[in-house]
Structures are given as C-alpha cells and as structure tokens.
Amino acid sequence: MSRLYDRADIYDLIDSDQRTDTIRRDWREFLDEREIHTMLDVSIGTGSMTLPLQELGIEISGSDLSEAMLDRCKKKASAKGTSVELKCCDFRDLSCWAGREFDCVVSTGNALGYVNNSDVVLTLGKMDSLVKPGGFLCFDSRNWEMIQKEKQRFYFYNPFFRDGNRINLVQVWDHHADGSITFNLLYSFEKDNRVFQREIFEELYHPFRINLALDKMKEMGYDNIAIEPVPCFSEQRDFSKIDWYRVIGQKTAC
Ligand SMILES: C[S@@+](CC[C@H](N)C(=O)[O-])C[C@H]1O[C@@H](n2cnc3c(N)ncnc32)[C@H](O)[C@@H]1O
C-alpha cells in the first residue's frame, strides 16, 4: 500500500481557494496581535496550512519527513511567486535548523500524533530550542481525548470536484488495544456515476492527552497559553466537543 505522503498530489486534492481563505482567516484571527514575522513549520507537508500566512506578511520556513510533500510545497510557493526555505528532517531531530531562531515554531496538520507520547514531549523541546526569547510555540491536534472516549470510527468529508470528477473521501478509524489508532483513508473517484479509481492509505497515530503537551510547555517556561478550536471562529467552545484544537504559548522573554 502506498503512503499518503508519497502521494502529495492526492493529499492536496482537498485543497481549494475556499479552504485556503478559511485557513488564512483562522490564522489571522488566532494570531491576533501577536508579533510574528518569521515562522517555522516542522511538519509543513505541502504547505496548505502555513503557506497562506505569506499573504499576511509572515516569512515561512518549513521541514517535513516527506520529500514528496516538500517538493509539492516548493512548487506551490513558486506558483504563487513566493519562495519558502525547506529542509527534509524528522521533527524529533531539528538539528538541520541549528543556530536559527524564529518568532514562532509550529507543527501543523495533526502531525505530533505520528510519534509516541514520549517523542511528543521530546519534539516540543526541540521546537522550543528554535523559538526566540519572547516568541511562540504552537501546534494543532485532533482532540484525541474526545476520539478515544467516543471510540469514533467514521469521519466523512463533503465530496469535492476536480477536473470534472467527483471525489469522495471517508476515513475509517481502527482503535487498537494499545491505544494507537489506524486511520484508513478511502478515496473514490467517480465520473458519470461510475467509480473509476480507488486509493487507500493507512496512517498510524499515537493519541496524546493535551495536558502532556501543556505540562511540557509550562515546564519550559511558556506563558499566556491559549487553546482554541480549529478554526478558531468555530462556535463550539466546549473542549470536550471540539474536534480539532490549536495551542499557542509564549516563551519567557529572556
Ligand atoms: C496531515 S499532514 C499535514 C501537512 C501540512 N502541515 C498540512 O497541513 O498540509 C502530516 C505531515 O506530517 C509529516 N510528518 C509525519 N511524521 C513526521 C515526523 N516525525 N517529522 C516530520 N514530519 C512528519 C508528514 O510527512 C506529513 O507531511
């Protein structure tokens, strides 16, 4: 079975101008008055979550484990007439960025759950080493506590249309005894009411409690910690019902 992140073309099918506008609005409202001019995304993928920030005047840099995702990210930036500094690395070892500092270091796209809980803590420490004094550390995640409590299994997307084809995406989640969850991503491509292509991917996640990350951030001296739904203008404010959340905290200034 091919890996989703080797198929950046399929991963990005969900992209649209409307989604990009929503992502940009979400960031604009979420970042609010925070002084952020440079941002490093350590799971930038194809850049769908962070390239839209370039239009807000933020200089974006990124790294990711997948060359295919980075390659697509680079092409997307150049298609917009911009550029983005990219490196291929695991976020558990960010030494490729050693000596650099950013106003904000972020992990986008629910990526921290790819590694086990102790590596989530390790990764937050590595991210912190690249945050300027007074800067920000930020990540987004699915609300694993809610998913595990409800043993949610199915996640549906609205169909989308590309090149005259209708594309359906459904996720089926297998909950394992050790607490890990396999996401099965099922794509079907339809034309004239016939499915002519199917693509199936499996991704293994390691759910973590939000407090694991918050405790680490506090231990590292982060303050002014905010937790918001994604997008932040969602009406749902009850954390136990929020599907996806984002956390940001500010590093001590000196
Ligand atoms: C769901 S995608 C999100 C990509 C991008 N942030 C976005 O929103 O489009 C998750 C990304 O995390 C990356 N990833 C997974 N494990 C990683 C790791 N250990 N280090 C760095 N990147 C990782 C994958 O290659 C993939 O690009």
Image: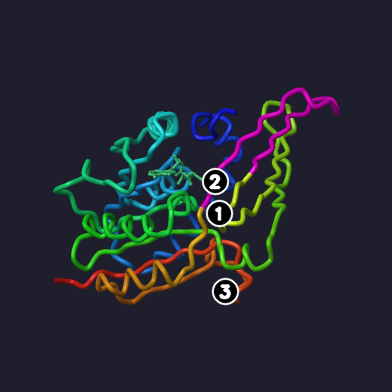
Residue 42: say if magenta: no
Residue type at mark 2 is Leu
Q: Is residue 7 left or right of residue 137?
A: right
- Looking at the rendered structure, the secondary structure element under dot 3 is helix
Asked where in the image residue 195 lies, by quadrant, the reply is: top right
Please name the predominant secondary structure of the magenta segment in the image: strand
Q: Marks 1 and 2, Cα distance to the nearest angstrom?
A: 7 Å
Q: Look at label 1 and name its amino acid.
A: Ser
Identity of the amino acid at label 3?
A: Phe
- Which residue is under mark 3? 239
Q: Is residue 199 magenta?
A: yes
Q: Secondary structure beneath disc 1?
A: loop
Which mark lies nearer to you, 3 or 1?
Answer: 1
Q: Earlier in the sequence, mark 3 or mark 1?
A: 1
Read off the residue under disc 1: 180
User: Circle 2 is placed at which residue position?
Assistant: 204
Residue range of the region highlighted in magenta in the rendering? 184-205
